[in-house]
Amino acid sequence: MVSSAQVLIVSSSHANIHASARPHHCPVRGCPRSYGGKGFKRKTEVARHRRIHDYAGYVCPFCPDHQHKSPGPDGLLHHVRIHHVDKSSDDPLVRDVLSQRPHFFYFPNRRNGLA
């Protein structure tokens, strides 16, 4: 059975989705999502975002100075589709980056650390 305290926690977390406030921030200085920046609506989004800082993963071959990095291949493909509309996901540079499978991947919400 679910306690009323658990329901309150879940409903307040869900309420953040519909609000304009972004009360959770990245603790890394200089990050656009840190304090004073954009922030996140949920704590779980911060945990997922931290992978960007903890592990380089897949680096965009089209960004100057390779400034965009994504911990997973789907993130890189999404980034290319949104920010480099003149490029294709079948571009040889993208395929080359995706073929370099990372040696380590960090899952902050997994108890055993495995996928």
Image (cartoon, rainbow, N blue to C red):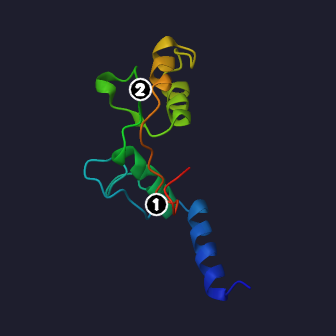
Q: Determine the residue located farthest toward the right in the rendered image.
A: 1
Residue 61: image x %, image y %? 40, 21
Residue 20: image x %, image y %? 52, 59
Residue 75: image x %, image y %? 52, 36
Where is the N terminus found, in terms of image quarters? bottom right
Check the image and report above or below for 38 versus 24: above
SS label for mark 1? loop
In front: 103, or 1? 103
| Residue at left offset 40%, top offset 20% | 62
The answer to whether residue 42 is seen in the rendering is no
SS label for mark 2? loop
Looking at marks 1 and 2 on the same chain, the residue that comes earlier in the sequence is marked by: 1
Residue 109: image x %, image y %? 51, 60
In front: 86, or 99? 99
| Residue at left offset 45%, top offset 45% | 105
Tell me the amino acid under the disc marked 2.
Cys
Q: Nearer the viewer, mark 1 or mark 2?
A: 2
Distance (Cα) linking label 1 and label 2: 27 Å
Residue located beneath label 1 in the image: 22
Mark seen at residue 60: 2
